[in-house]
Image: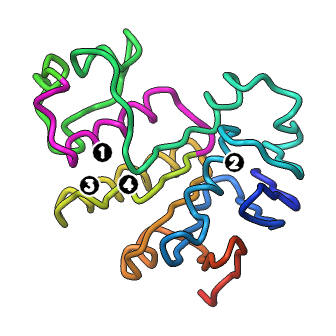
Amino acid sequence: MLKIRDLSTAVIGPLSLTVAPGQCVAISGPSGAGKSLLLRAIADLDPWQGEIFLDETPAHAMNAADWRRQVQLLPAEPQWWASTVAGHFPPETDVDPTLLGFGLEVWQWPVQRLSSGEKQRLALLRALARRPRVLLLDEPTANLDDASARRVEALVADYRGQHQAMVVWVSHAGAQRVRVADSYYEMDAGQLRQEAE
Protein backbone atom coordinates (compact mmCIF):
# COMPACT_ATOMS: atom_id res chain seq x y z
CA MET A 1 0.00 0.00 0.00
CA LEU A 2 1.20 3.50 -0.89
CA LYS A 3 0.04 5.99 1.74
CA ILE A 4 0.58 9.71 1.34
CA ARG A 5 -0.37 11.94 4.26
CA ASP A 6 -0.29 15.75 4.30
CA LEU A 7 2.29 15.90 1.52
CA SER A 8 3.36 19.42 0.66
CA THR A 9 6.05 21.21 -1.30
CA ALA A 10 6.64 24.88 -1.99
CA VAL A 11 3.92 24.67 -4.67
CA ILE A 12 1.50 21.83 -3.86
CA GLY A 13 -0.47 20.47 -0.92
CA PRO A 14 -0.97 19.60 1.75
CA LEU A 15 -2.70 16.58 0.23
CA SER A 16 -3.29 12.93 1.00
CA LEU A 17 -3.73 9.88 -1.21
CA THR A 18 -3.84 6.11 -0.72
CA VAL A 19 -3.20 3.58 -3.48
CA ALA A 20 -3.92 -0.08 -2.74
CA PRO A 21 -1.92 -2.99 -4.21
CA GLY A 22 -3.02 -3.59 -7.80
CA GLN A 23 -4.86 -0.27 -7.97
CA CYS A 24 -4.48 2.46 -10.60
CA VAL A 25 -5.33 6.03 -9.65
CA ALA A 26 -5.72 8.56 -12.46
CA ILE A 27 -5.01 12.26 -11.96
CA SER A 28 -6.00 14.98 -14.39
CA GLY A 29 -6.08 18.76 -14.24
CA PRO A 30 -5.02 21.90 -16.09
CA SER A 31 -1.42 22.61 -17.02
CA GLY A 32 0.44 24.07 -14.07
CA ALA A 33 -1.87 22.44 -11.51
CA GLY A 34 1.02 20.54 -9.94
CA LYS A 35 0.53 17.01 -11.33
CA SER A 36 4.14 16.47 -12.38
CA LEU A 37 5.40 18.08 -9.17
CA LEU A 38 3.29 15.66 -7.16
CA LEU A 39 4.84 12.68 -8.96
CA ARG A 40 8.35 14.09 -8.44
CA ALA A 41 7.68 14.52 -4.72
CA ILE A 42 6.36 10.95 -4.36
CA ALA A 43 9.50 9.72 -6.14
CA ASP A 44 11.60 11.77 -3.68
CA LEU A 45 13.14 13.82 -6.49
CA ASP A 46 12.06 17.19 -5.05
CA PRO A 47 12.00 18.36 -1.42
CA TRP A 48 8.72 17.63 0.38
CA GLN A 49 7.16 17.55 3.81
CA GLY A 50 4.59 15.19 5.26
CA GLU A 51 4.56 11.39 5.25
CA ILE A 52 4.86 8.79 2.50
CA PHE A 53 4.74 5.08 3.33
CA LEU A 54 5.28 2.03 1.16
CA ASP A 55 3.42 -0.56 3.21
CA GLU A 56 4.66 0.31 6.71
CA THR A 57 8.05 1.69 5.65
CA PRO A 58 8.35 5.48 5.58
CA ALA A 59 10.20 7.03 2.65
CA HIS A 60 12.55 8.83 5.01
CA ALA A 61 13.70 5.48 6.43
CA MET A 62 15.10 4.39 3.05
CA ASN A 63 17.96 5.86 1.07
CA ALA A 64 16.87 7.69 -2.07
CA ALA A 65 18.26 5.10 -4.51
CA ASP A 66 16.38 2.21 -2.84
CA TRP A 67 13.16 4.23 -2.72
CA ARG A 68 13.36 5.16 -6.41
CA ARG A 69 14.07 1.56 -7.35
CA GLN A 70 10.71 0.60 -5.85
CA VAL A 71 8.86 3.83 -6.71
CA GLN A 72 9.63 4.46 -10.40
CA LEU A 73 8.78 7.75 -12.08
CA LEU A 74 8.26 7.75 -15.84
CA PRO A 75 8.49 11.45 -16.72
CA ALA A 76 6.82 13.00 -19.74
CA GLU A 77 10.27 13.43 -21.31
CA PRO A 78 12.45 10.50 -20.20
CA GLN A 79 16.21 10.89 -20.17
CA TRP A 80 18.65 8.80 -22.22
CA TRP A 81 22.38 8.57 -21.55
CA ALA A 82 23.86 5.49 -23.28
CA SER A 83 24.39 5.34 -27.03
CA THR A 84 22.18 2.27 -27.63
CA VAL A 85 18.82 1.15 -26.27
CA ALA A 86 20.35 -1.93 -24.61
CA GLY A 87 22.65 0.29 -22.56
CA HIS A 88 19.64 1.49 -20.56
CA PHE A 89 18.46 -1.96 -19.43
CA PRO A 90 19.75 -4.47 -16.86
CA PRO A 91 21.98 -7.11 -18.50
CA GLU A 92 19.55 -9.97 -17.79
CA THR A 93 16.37 -8.06 -18.63
CA ASP A 94 13.32 -10.17 -19.37
CA VAL A 95 10.96 -7.49 -20.65
CA ASP A 96 9.50 -8.22 -24.07
CA PRO A 97 9.72 -5.29 -26.53
CA THR A 98 7.29 -7.00 -28.91
CA LEU A 99 4.49 -6.18 -26.45
CA LEU A 100 4.92 -2.53 -27.40
CA GLY A 101 5.31 -3.08 -31.12
CA PHE A 102 9.11 -3.44 -31.38
CA GLY A 103 11.18 -6.24 -32.83
CA LEU A 104 14.04 -7.79 -30.87
CA GLU A 105 16.50 -5.76 -32.94
CA VAL A 106 15.43 -2.68 -30.97
CA TRP A 107 18.07 -3.47 -28.33
CA GLN A 108 20.78 -2.54 -30.81
CA TRP A 109 19.20 0.67 -32.05
CA PRO A 110 21.13 3.88 -31.44
CA VAL A 111 19.21 6.21 -29.15
CA GLN A 112 19.64 9.09 -31.61
CA ARG A 113 17.37 7.37 -34.12
CA LEU A 114 14.43 7.09 -31.70
CA SER A 115 11.32 9.22 -32.13
CA SER A 116 9.70 10.81 -29.07
CA GLY A 117 6.99 8.13 -29.11
CA GLU A 118 9.55 5.31 -29.30
CA LYS A 119 11.42 6.86 -26.39
CA GLN A 120 8.23 6.95 -24.34
CA ARG A 121 7.45 3.29 -24.97
CA LEU A 122 11.00 2.13 -24.35
CA ALA A 123 11.24 4.20 -21.17
CA LEU A 124 8.20 2.34 -19.86
CA LEU A 125 9.91 -0.99 -20.61
CA ARG A 126 13.03 0.34 -18.87
CA ALA A 127 11.00 1.16 -15.76
CA LEU A 128 9.25 -2.23 -15.74
CA ALA A 129 12.57 -4.05 -16.13
CA ARG A 130 13.45 -2.92 -12.60
CA ARG A 131 10.26 -4.51 -11.20
CA PRO A 132 9.01 -1.47 -9.25
CA ARG A 133 6.22 -1.77 -6.73
CA VAL A 134 4.89 1.68 -7.63
CA LEU A 135 4.68 3.22 -11.12
CA LEU A 136 4.30 6.99 -11.42
CA LEU A 137 3.30 7.69 -15.02
CA ASP A 138 3.36 11.28 -16.30
CA GLU A 139 1.28 11.23 -19.49
CA PRO A 140 3.01 8.10 -20.81
CA THR A 141 0.99 8.02 -24.05
CA ALA A 142 1.09 11.74 -24.92
CA ASN A 143 3.25 11.20 -28.02
CA LEU A 144 1.64 7.95 -29.16
CA ASP A 145 -0.92 7.00 -31.78
CA ASP A 146 -4.02 5.20 -30.58
CA ALA A 147 -2.74 1.68 -31.29
CA SER A 148 0.52 2.29 -29.42
CA ALA A 149 -1.34 3.93 -26.54
CA ARG A 150 -3.57 0.87 -26.20
CA ARG A 151 -0.49 -1.38 -26.07
CA VAL A 152 0.92 0.75 -23.24
CA GLU A 153 -2.39 0.58 -21.37
CA ALA A 154 -2.52 -3.20 -21.75
CA LEU A 155 1.09 -3.67 -20.61
CA VAL A 156 0.60 -1.53 -17.49
CA ALA A 157 -2.65 -3.35 -16.66
CA ASP A 158 -0.93 -6.72 -17.05
CA TYR A 159 2.03 -5.63 -14.91
CA ARG A 160 -0.09 -4.34 -12.04
CA GLY A 161 -2.25 -7.46 -12.18
CA GLN A 162 0.72 -9.83 -12.07
CA HIS A 163 2.74 -7.93 -9.47
CA GLN A 164 0.00 -6.14 -7.51
CA ALA A 165 1.81 -2.94 -8.41
CA MET A 166 0.37 0.45 -7.52
CA VAL A 167 0.00 2.98 -10.35
CA VAL A 168 -0.52 6.74 -10.31
CA TRP A 169 -1.30 7.77 -13.90
CA VAL A 170 -1.45 11.42 -14.97
CA SER A 171 -3.61 11.75 -18.08
CA HIS A 172 -5.58 14.50 -19.80
CA ALA A 173 -7.63 11.99 -21.80
CA GLY A 174 -10.98 11.32 -20.15
CA ALA A 175 -11.61 8.13 -22.09
CA GLN A 176 -8.21 6.78 -21.14
CA ARG A 177 -8.78 7.48 -17.46
CA VAL A 178 -11.93 5.37 -17.58
CA ARG A 179 -10.06 2.52 -19.31
CA VAL A 180 -7.02 2.38 -17.04
CA ALA A 181 -8.00 3.58 -13.57
CA ASP A 182 -10.01 2.40 -10.58
CA SER A 183 -10.41 5.89 -9.11
CA TYR A 184 -10.09 9.42 -10.44
CA TYR A 185 -8.77 12.68 -9.05
CA GLU A 186 -8.73 16.24 -10.33
CA MET A 187 -5.77 18.41 -9.41
CA ASP A 188 -6.05 22.18 -9.36
CA ALA A 189 -3.91 24.80 -7.66
CA GLY A 190 -1.87 22.12 -5.93
CA GLN A 191 -4.86 20.33 -4.39
CA LEU A 192 -6.46 16.94 -5.14
CA ARG A 193 -10.19 16.34 -5.33
CA GLN A 194 -11.61 12.84 -5.83
CA GLU A 195 -14.17 12.57 -8.61
CA ALA A 196 -17.14 10.23 -8.84
CA GLU A 197 -16.31 6.93 -10.51
Mark 3 or mark 1: which comes first in sequence? Answer: 1
Mark 2 or mark 1: which comes first in sequence? Answer: 2
Residue type, label 2: Ala
On the rendered structure, is 161 left or right of 173? right
In front: label 2 or label 1: 2
Q: Relative to 50, say whether 192 is above or below.
A: below
Which residue bears the numbered disc 1? 120
Residue in the image at 45% along x and 34% along y = 127
**Are the residues tagged 2 and 1 within 8 Å (C-beta)?**
no
On the rendered structure, is 103 left or right of 119? left
> Looking at the picture, how far across and down is residue 93, in whole percent?
37, 18
Q: Relative to 182, say whether 123 is above or below.
A: above
**Are the residues tagged 2 and 3 within 8 Å (C-beta)?**
no
Q: How far apart are marks 3 and 4 (CA)?
A: 11 Å
The quadrant in which the C terminus is found is bottom right
**Are the residues tagged 2 and 4 within 8 Å (C-beta)?**
no
- Label 3: which secondary element: helix
- Label 4: which secondary element: loop
Mark 2 or mark 4: which comes first in sequence? Answer: 2
**Are the residues tagged 4 and 1 within 8 Å (C-beta)?**
yes
Nearer to me, 54 or 142: 142
Mark 3 or mark 4: which comes first in sequence? Answer: 4
> Looking at the picture, how far across and down is residue 103, in whole percent?
11, 31
Tell me, yes or no, whether the highlighted magenta stretch contains residue 124.
Answer: yes
Which residue bears the numbered disc 4? 140
On the rendered structure, is 22 left or right of 143? right
- Magenta range is 111-134
* Numbered circle sitting on residue 151: 3
- Label 2: which secondary element: helix
> Looking at the picture, how far across and down is residue 68, in whole percent?
64, 31
